[in-house]
Image: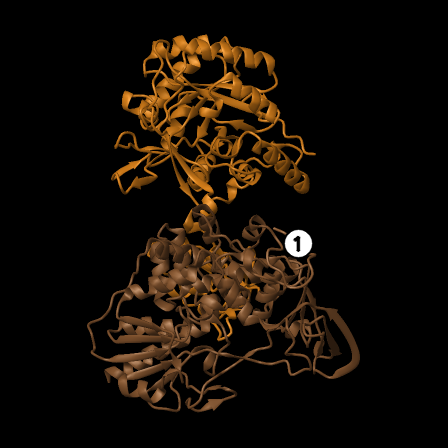
Chain colours: A brown, B orange
Amino acid sequence: MSNTPFSDGIQAARLDAAELSENFGDLHPRFDDHEALVAADRCYFCHDAPCMTACPTDIDIPLFIRQIATGTPEAAAKTIFDQNILGGMCARVCPTETLCEQVCVRETAEGNPVEIGRLQRYATDKLVDAGLHPFGRADSTGKKVAVVGAGPAGLSAAHRLAMHGHDVTVYDARAKAGGLNEFGIAAYKSVESFAEREVDWLLKIGGITVETGKKLGDGLSLDGLKTEFDAVFLGIGLGGVNALGVDGEDKDGVDDAVDFIAELRQADDLGQMAIGRDVVVIGGGMTAVDAAVQAKLLGALNVSLVYRRGKDRMNASEFEQDLAASKGVRIITNASPKSVIGNGAVREIEFEYTDNDLKPTGQTIRLAADQVFKAIGQTLEGDGLPELEWGKIKVDDSGRTSVAGIWAGGDCATGGDDLTVTAVAEGRDAAEDIHAKLSA
Amino acid sequence: MANLESDFVGIKSPNPFWLASAPPTDKEYNVRRAFEAGWGGVVWKTLGAEGPPVVNVNGPRYGAIHGADRRLLGLNNIELITDRPLDVNLEEMTRVKRDYPDHALIASVMVPCEEDEWKRILPMIAETGCDGFELNFGCPHGMAERGMGSAVGQVPDYIEMVARWCKEATDLPVIVKLTPNITNILHPAEAALRGGADAVSLINTINSITNVNLDAMSPEPMIDGKGTHGGYCGPAVKPIALNMVAEIARNPETAKLPISGIGGITTWRDAAEFMALGAGNVQVCTAAMTYGFKIVQEMISGLSQWMDEKGYTSTADFVGMATPNVTDWQYLNLNHVTKAVINQDDCISCGRCYAACEDTSHQAIEMSEDRVFTVKDDECVACNLCVNVCPVENCITMRTLDVGEMDERTGKPVEADYGNWTAHPNNPMSTAAE
């Protein structure tokens, strides 16, 4: 190892292997049996529980926690998977602090909710690690459904459709299924190749064929799919990345945060991941935090996360903001990028202070930067899609698009937050609607 | 700080907290440390007759019931009386009493139901300098199969007979320890009184099977694939013990019979409750077996603080104060009307009161769309279930309706007069004067 956090420019191996391994360990290690029992004992088994209402997939949380408390975590896992087949990943990436745990009555009572997310992980890991898949397929319907996009929405839809006896083909542009679970979240949230293992486990249902390296407009056409299949579900996510729209954006060292996150997730050796000494991440969402925190964990000396509005307007949850701060990320708010400065490669980036309505103040600051990550949102890509609304595929509550026979869900479609758990719910619900339609 | 000094049938101790006859009091090593920790007295683990001592099982002796967070709520045991030679116990008792003259040392005794056995052993034990005897008529397992323990305690005539022998054999106070494994606690208590006992202590443990091993299909604790009933104790038995203490304390025939209260006492408050119902002092075992000897320090500080707050200067001030308020159902005032009230500031909206009332009681709680829970006064019978299932203390309380105030459930104003079942018009045996 020749580099340190002080090494100039974008360099690999700023930290030694042991430090990197430590830094990228499990963010919330799995509960052991004792911890799970202690945590489960705290659940009050509320009537019509607020946590259930807050869960986009409506998991029966009091029931699964009681099943853990009574020594049957496998039954608890089944309760979770009944509603959310990606309950394992959701247990890792859900912003529980703004969903189930936020409304837990023990949060109300003591400011200390039942640790629902970690309990969910405890239960789901039991079945996934054991390779036990608790669902079987109904008799074959002879119907074929195409699912485009092997992310959370697509996988959720595919599993439910397969369960109902339909034959499903899932297409994905990447070389590997999983979507954002595999490529789009911080490594410390999904250690030990969990996303990949979860996909393998999910496919045990049978009746699902995955074809990678295929995307709409490149080997696939909607018309072709409509002809070949009885129904089509689009879970294609948001493939495009918003540009900053400032001078110097094309300089070396200015990258998309999603690419950095994907590359890091697929890296076999974190010591080969190059990172700047002075890193600036622009954006205020989960992607920005994931990029900033991981930059710091790779050994960047200074990492600043810069957001154009106030802290309370950031899409990243308070937990995520605190996580970033605790790892040493400096969060700068009310600053909007003006220009990227440097001779060929970025050296500095200039911001102008803005109020919460983005009104410029005329005051500027410059931050040293040898690497800049853009994380200011993603956009839908593709031509010939069903009718759009606000830049997304317009769907109704059942996921139906403007085109008969085509459903959509997840980040590419309207409705709900852009969360893994929301995508799972939308995929599942669209699958039920497809099933109803095909059974009619 | 209140004076906790205790005088129980002439036996003095620095406080009313004694360790009950059980494993914690089995040997000098433990008893010395118990006294150093603050216990006012100990009842030495039951001594048996001379000769080869009893033997215990070599597998597990205890089973347990747990509450949330694995808090031990009930313990059951199949251990027998001391399995150490009598002379060793007597030597140790002598040394301990010599070094702790101000602490109470009581000898628990169990020998076969023969007059000469009892009359021979008591004087031997008295030479240790012990302050009194407790006759173990309660042990429900093992020894009972040999005609001792609860086998004696379940036959009032035997209790009376043995108590009389013992009183003839010693001038020291004799306490008869009662088994709860009977239908009416008054019969053995009255028998002890007739036999001349100075006091009774209760309860001993309750016949119980705590768990079944579903793999081996055997009761727990399991010894080589078999189990037997044990003696149940700990917080779970406190309500049963309190009732039995109260029954003896309010029974005219036994009202003056001193009681040493035993049964799940874990905190100062538990002790105060036993004493309020008529126990002159208390004995503790499971709490010490769960948390160690140190817990007596909380009992001492808690009882002192409460006595100071109430203005009691001695434990005798409040012993039995609650006894007159223990009555029969038929004398409860049917004109006393209360209604549940939910404090919305304290409510955490868990909905447990609603589920309990809606599914299993009187459908007297309303739930709004936004999870506000309110009591329907026209349905509420004041059963108290909502209070009991609410996880927030004092969030739901019972409000007593004023005289003249309308009870919306019955449509009648609250009457001023006391009125009980004996005079109620619905009672075919009503004794109301027309």
Q: Position of residue A156 (x, y in %)?
A: 37, 71
Q: Residue at x 57, y 64 (%)?
A: B343
Horizontal arrangement in the rendering, residue B385 relative to residue B310 (left or right)? left
Dividing the picture into quadrants, the one containing residue A422 is bottom left
**B80 or A43: which is nearer to us?**
A43
Of the residues shown, which amino acid type is indicated by label 1? Thr
**Residue B200 visible at all:** yes
Q: Which residue is drawn at 34% across and 39% down?
A: B210
Q: Where is residue A225 in the image (x, y as percent from the top left)?
A: 31, 85
Q: Position of residue A57 (x, y in %)?
A: 42, 71
Q: Residue furthest right?
A: A363
**In the figure, B243 relative to A374: above or below?**
above
**B239 or A353: which is nearer to us?**
A353
**In the figure, B138 relative to A402: above or below?**
above
Give the chain letter at badge 1: A
**In the figure, B45 relative to B422: above or below?**
above
Q: Residue at x 51, y 45 (%)?
A: B325
Per the image, the residue denoted by label 1 is A4
Horizontal arrangement in the rendering, residue A384 relative to residue A98 (left or right)? left
Number of other residues with Cα within 10 Å of mark 1, as a class: few under 14, some 14 to 19, many 20 or more: some
Q: Position of residue A140 (x, y in %)?
A: 20, 74
**A187 or A116: which is nearer to us?**
A187
